[in-house]
Amino acid sequence: MLRYTFLRHLATTAFAASTALLGVSSSAHAQGTTEVPFYYPVAVGGPIAKVIDGFAEGFMKENPGIKVSPIYAGTYQETIVKALTAHKSGTPPVTSVLLSTDMFTLIDEDAIVPFDNFAKSADDKAWLGGFYKAFMQNSQTGGKTWGVPFQRSTVVMYWNKEAFKEAGLDPNKPPTSWVELQSMATKLTKKDASGKVTQYGVQIPSSGFPYWLFQTLSTTNDVILANDTGSKVTFDNPKVIEALQFWVDLGKAGVHPSGVVEWGTTPKDFFEKKAAIIYTTTGNLTNIRKNAPFDFGVAMIPGNKRKGSPTGGGNFYIFKKSTPGQQEAAYKFIQWITQPERAAQWSIDTGYVATSAAAYDTPALKKYAADFPPALVARDQLPVSVAEFSTHDNQRITKVLNDGLQAALTGTKTPAQAMKDAQSEANRLLRGYK
């Protein structure tokens, strides 16, 4: 499944649309069935919806007193708008998969309850402690667990092995550093007789989630963009500016497309040999495996001062205004769907990282990884991965950073000025959270 595109601004969602979307009563039925409306961030239909529907049906067969109703609510951003609108109207979903970076926003809106309220037994606590620590960085704050990892990812690098051969490069040795990336991208860039580039050496998308892709550069330059309490950012740090300058310079050198590069079309550009190396989510792995008309490789993000990538993707949250019975039912469903066997199957079906080490010990995922080793790259990158950028007032702060990155990439500001301006605006917006 593809990671979904952020809207530039929060859309407004009418109360009536929100309540109509729920489509079910927020209270338990008289017959004793507990209703669990469940918002999921994808448009109606498609293979992912079928997988989620299958999970819901499987759970209900084992738990006949609980009715889980998946509601396909659009993009991640549309889904959180709908969820918060429903929360404010008093008819929220019981649970939803939303971005892990929405945690501070949901806490500030008093919309969710911590999972610690339900994890009372030793088994419960063992389950909650079984997720990869890298994923829990965007799931815990203030000593509490607010989200449970489900469809999580890291950014990885894909490369066209045929293009490497044609350029005289070893097809089994991708770049591992910024220096190698720039050198190889130069050799991989192709031009036609008129001098027009027909194949760029490297492509890092900068629409949709510019901040997330930029973290592959800031992290590897050994700088973190926000503190762990979400109250302070470091956009004007010299290491941040240096990382942005590197990205801009790839475009100036002609080995990377200039300006803003589309997130959604980057895999297609890879398939069509318009880019020899791309950065995108491991959530694109199944898509690329099915559609790339050439042999390709998957590798960790090239390092500079260190290796690393941000984590990404969605967590389960439980909404506060649902009834205690609904919350317990949602907790049971979330435990069920994140068990190792199901997490393994989800990873196989989508390309997302299975969220626990136990999932990688299942026979199904062991066999899949043995047949297709690239499936392990994102997991193996987790020890050097960092939290996805997230702050209080996250939508506005993220937009400030995205706008600054795009200003530098389009040449309307220097990287230094773009980050200085972004820092100033972020400081203003975060003043009340310090």
Image (cartoon, rainbow, N blue to C red):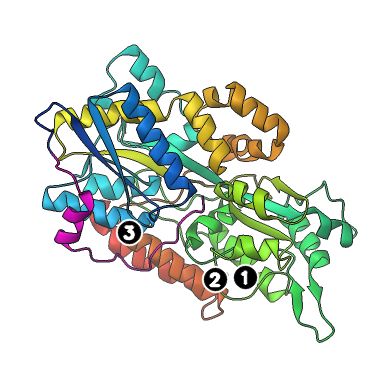
The image quarter in which residue 395 lies: bottom left
- In the rendering, at what x and y percent does residue 170 appear? 87, 51
Q: Residues within 10 Å of mark 1 (few under 14, many from 20)?
A: many
* For residue 163, above or below residue 418: above
Please report whichever mark, 3 or 2, sits nearer to the chain's N-terminal start: 3
**On the image, numbered disc 1 is attached to which residue?**
248
The image quarter in which residue 368 lies: top right
CA gap, disc 3 and disc 2: 31 Å
158 vs 140, nearest the viewer = 158
- In the rendering, at what x and y percent does residue 81 appear? 27, 57
Q: Which mark is residue 78?
A: 3
Q: Residue furthest top?
A: 122
Q: Is residue 138 visible?
A: no
Q: Do the residues under discs 1 and 2 have CB atoms within 8 angstroms? A: yes
- In the rendering, at what x and y percent does residue 303 appear? 67, 49
CA gap, disc 1 and disc 2: 8 Å
97 vs 424, nearest the viewer = 97
Magenta-colored stretch includes residue 17: yes
**On the image, numbered disc 2 is attached to which residue?**
415
* For residue 367, above or below residue 5: above
Q: Residue at x 57, y 42 (%)?
A: 351
For the magenta stretch, what is the residue range?
A: 1-26
- In the rendering, at what x and y percent does residue 394 appear? 34, 56
| Three-letter residue code for mark 2 | Pro
32 vs 368, nearest the viewer = 32
Q: Residue at x 29, y 58 (%)?
A: 430
Please report whichever mark, 1 or 3, sits nearer to the chain's N-terminal start: 3
At mark 1, the secondary structure is: helix
